[in-house]
Image (spheres, grey):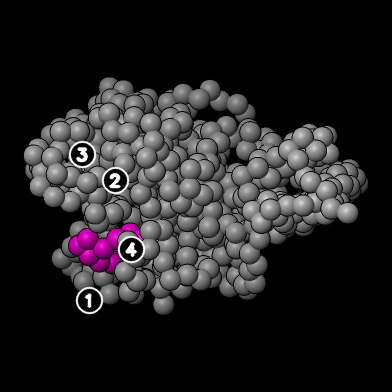
Amino acid sequence: MSKKLTRRRFLRGSGGVIVALPLFQSDFITGRVSKASAATSEPLRFVAMFRPNGTAQPFAGAPDYWWPTTNANGNGPLSDGKGGTFNFNHCNAPLSSIAPHVNFLHGLDYTRDERRGPRSGPNDGYPRPDDVGYDFDPGEGHQMGMGKFLTGRPLLTGAQAGGDGSLAGWASGISLDQHLAKTLSKGKRFSSLELGVHVTNGDVRGRMSYAGANQPLPPTNSPRAVFDRIFSDLNTSPTALQALRARRGSVLDTVLDRCKSYMNYELGYEERQRMEQHCGMIRDLEERIVATPVIGDRCQLPAVPGSPTLSPENIPIFSQLHIDLLVMAFACDLTRVATLQYSDSFNLIPFSFPIADRVNQSDAFLLGHEISHSFHNVGREFNELIVREKWYSRQVASFASKLAAYGEGSGSMLDNTVILWSSELAHGHHRHNNAPLTLIGGKNAGIKGGRYLQYGPGRPHNDLLRTIMNAVGVPGDSFGRPDWNTGVLEGLVS
C-alpha cells in the first residue's frame, strides 16, 4: 500500500539524521557532489585565478603595458606560431620565469551584444541609466564581467545595485569550474575548492563560481578554515581514521536506507526526480569518505597556518598560505578543481605592504578601484597599477612554479593543470573587449605554452571556455550561452 509523503512526514522521518551530517551539509544542499566518471592516465585539473578591475591596456592615451611586445632581435620567448616572436610586457614580466608554460590570448571578449542601438552618452563602454535605445544585459560593467568570466552567460535580473545604480541578480548558469568538477573530481574528497584573498564583497561583484543559475559559491578567506576543512583527517592516526570512516559510513547507510524508503511513497514526477538525485548524492558521499589519502610520498600534512587578521597589509601572507594549501591539496589528490580569487571587483582596498617595484611608498594607500579608473592619466595611478599587476603576476608564477616542482606521470603537476587567469574587465573603464585572458600549464591536456595567440577582434570568450572543457576531457559543443559560441579556438590545443 503506497503512502503520501508529506513535508511534515519527511521532516519528522529524516530531520534527526540530517542533523547528524554537519560535515556533509554544504555538499548535500548545494548539489555539488560529482556524478560523472573520468578515466584518464593523467590526473587533469583546472584552476581559475582572478584579480580585479582589468589591466593596463591602451585607452585614452595610456600605453599598452599588458600585451606582449614585438621582439626586434627575433629570439623572444613567445611565439605567435607564424614566425613572429614577442617579449613579456611590464605588467606580466614575472611570468617570464615560467615562459614555456604561458599562453596570452588576444582578441577575446566577454560578450558581443551588451549594447544594441544608438547611444546618447559618450562611447566609453560604461552603461548609464540615461542611455537611449539600448538593450543592456542586467548590471554594470563590474557586475557583468564577474558573472560572465566563468559562466559565459548574462546575469539574471535582480536588486543588487552596481556602482552606477544599475540593478542585477546572480549569474544565469553554472561556471566552468563547477561543470568540470563533476567529471574531474569524481570520487575525490572534495568536488572543488573556492579560495579567496581579501574577498569582502558578498554580492555579484564578489562571486565568480556558480553551482548553477542563481547559486553563487563564496570563496573562503581564512587559510586556517581551509586547512581545518581539507586536512583535518590527514592528522588522524590510521586507527582513529578507520573508526571515523566507519562512523560516517554508518550514518550515511542510515540516510541512504531512509532515502530509499521514501521511494515507496506516492511521489509526483518532479518529487521522484529530486529524491533519486538526493539518493545518488548520498551514494557518492559514501565513495568519497574512503578517498582520504594516506600521508606519505609527496602528500604531506602542511604546517597549521596561523590566523592573520583579514587586512590589506596581510594580503601577501594570505596569498602564499592559500597557494601552499592548494598545491598540497592537489599533491594529496583531494580535489582536481579550484578557484583562487584576489579581492573582488569592488576592490576599494590599498596595497599597504612593501613592494620592491614601488618608487613612492605612499602610493601603497591608493585604493585599487580608483586606480583602475584613473590609470589613463599617466602618473602615480598608472605607475601603481603596474606595480600591483606585477605583484599579481608574481603570485601566478609562484603557484605555477610550485606545481612544476612536483613530478607526476609523464611530466609535472603543472603539465596536468590548466590555469585560467583573468579579470572581470579588460581595463578600468568597464570595457569587456580584449579581456586579459591568460592560460598557464596544461601540456598534458594538449596545450603548448610559450605563445602569444591572436584571435578576434570580437571573438567570444565562450570559445575559450569550451576549448578548455574539451581539452581536459569533458565533451560538449558549447559552454555558457549557446549563441555566444562560435567554435573551439584554433591552434590552442594540439
Q: Amino acid at mark 4?
A: Asp
Name the mark on residue 137. Answer: 2
- Point out the image quarter for the N terminus: bottom right
Q: Main secondary structure of the magenta part?
A: strand
- Residue 485's image quarter? bottom left
| Secondary-structure class at tag 4 | helix
Q: Is residue 41 left or right of residue 484?
A: right
The one of 446 and 130 positioned closer to us in this rendering: 130
Position of residue 316 measured from the top left corner of the image (x, y, whole percent): 46, 34
Q: Earlier in the sequence, mark 3 or mark 4?
A: 3
Q: Which residue is mark 1?
A: 83
| Secondary-structure class at tag 3 | loop
> In the rendered view, would you say 492 is above or below 298?
below
Position of residue 409 measured from the top left corner of the image (x, y, whole percent): 62, 70
Q: CA distance from mark 3 to mark 4?
A: 22 Å
Q: Which residue is mark 4?
A: 483
| Secondary-structure class at tag 2 | loop
